[in-house]
Amino acid sequence: MSDWEPKIVCFFCNWCTYGAADLAGVGRMEHPANTRVIRLPCSGRVSPKFILAALREGADGVWVSGCHPGDCHYIEGNYYARRKFALMKDLLEHMGMDPGRVQFSWISSAESTKYVDVAKKVIESIKELGPNTFFNKTQAKVA
Amino acid sequence: MLGYIDKIREISKGLLKDGKVDMIVGFRKGTAPLMNEPCRIVRADDTEHLVWDSNCGINLANYLANRKEKIGIVAKGCDSRNIVTHIIENKIKRDQLVIIGVPCKGMVDKFKLNRMADGEILEASEDEQSVTIKGEGFEKTVKKADVLQENCAVCTHRNPVIHDVMAADPVEEQKDIDPYAGVKAVEAMSTEEKRNYFDELTSACIRCYACRNACPLCYCPTCFVDESAPQWLGKTLDHVDTQTFHFLRAYHCAGRCTDCGACERACPMEIKVREFTKKLNKDCLELYGWEAGLTLEQRPPLDTFKLDDRENFIM
Ligand code: SF4
Ligand code: SF4
Ligand code: FES
């Protein structure tokens, strides 16, 4: 499976990471094209259902990114999100999901360099994990 | 514990007679042994149908959500914690309730007893320490302590945390037990082992949703399992659909689950669904110092935050 490339579904907050990705593009910075970005109004909008839905439909990894704590456009959305993510990640891994399949970051709209760095890291680490077989319905044993 | 019933009947009768409540929610004898059923009593004379023994494992808080009447409710430790949860989630008002607190010494596990029986159990009786089961050609007496529901065996809140009147003096709380020993055992496994463990655990699940229906926390008008646009999980028995259900069911109980065991008790396939919720309970305790249903004064963990919450997993 040498030509296998991971598909990574990214849930980015409109006010920060999405902007950072945009800025990176404007600045002609590059990273491998494994990401599929879904823009959300705030990291607080991310529901575990979205993450499971992405994996279920065949994503090999999920990357969620929002504003730094204290910088949320809606003041405290990402503080609530942080608690949701902590519990979610722990339970997923408790059930046997590879640590690193679902990743989180805080990236402000000015941090295009951090964006590219993290993107590369996320892509690299998910590549290492190989194709997702957990919560992936495309390999259903039953129709 | 068996002596409580006279007191429960007396209190209930008084409440109905004096018009302090419109109904009593309690237990009456079920049609099958080892299965008392929840009931609603509206006439003072009918309070004699109320019962209390070790077969009252169903969580009565399940019958409170969105009620408008004044209700007297019989509540053991875990029911009382789910009542607290209902109040802080605005599913019922404190002043609508007269809580008849019942100190609890644990409910017996009908699955365990069924496995011990040499045939169908047709009759069951109990005294303070033991349970006797009878069927065609067999009779067995076992110690209650050996056949408790698993959640009761590790329960540390046997006395109601909230009550208006008590049916008996508080019982001694269990000490020196680790409610999370099982979770720790799974935590120590490798990723592969964990995956196999949970796949195996849920392999018999028929997705009847009895576990969800028995849980007082599951009161949404439309459950995620029934949503169709978007559809979050398929209706099949493929393990992805099943695991998605179990993950989300548990996750929706995060910071709210009281480990009452009603879900496990309701499962016709004897699936240990508490394995999922217990992990979240442990996390909530370790990360946010929270145990569900102990206080009306604090917001639950997913409805609040601290500036220095754990974020070592965020880049
Ligand atoms: S775990 Fe048990 S009660 Fe819950 S859906 Fe599966 S079979 Fe039904
Ligand atoms: S998830 Fe199970 S143990 Fe937890 S509150 Fe609901 S019924 Fe009780
Ligand atoms: S607005 Fe970006 S995380 Fe809330």
Image (tube, coloured by chain):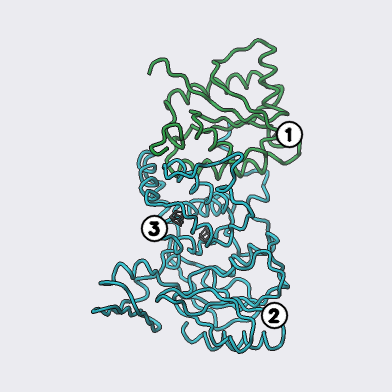
Residue located beneath label 2 in the image: B21
Give the residue pinned by disc 3: B269
**Image x and y of residue B278, in percent:** 48, 55
Judged from the image, the secondary structure of the residue bearing numbered disc 1 is loop
> Which chain is painted in green?
A
Please identify the quarter of the rendering in which residue B231 is found.
top right
What residue is drawn where x is 46% and y is 63%? B266
Q: Earlier in the sequence, mark 2 or mark 3?
A: 2
Secondary structure under tag 3 reads loop
Q: Residue furthest left?
A: B137
Q: Position of residue B80 (x, y in %)?
A: 59, 70
> In the rendered structure, are the residues bearing label 1 and label 3 in contact, judged by CB atoms less than 8 Å apart?
no
* Residue closer to the observer: B61 or B69: B69
Give the residue at mark 1: A71
**Can you tell which chain is drawn cyan?**
B
Q: Are marks 2 and 3 in contact (CB under 8 Å)?
A: no
How far is disc 1 from disc 3 in space, using C-alphas?
Answer: 48 Å
Label 1 C-beta lies within 8 Å of the nearest ligand 3 atom? yes
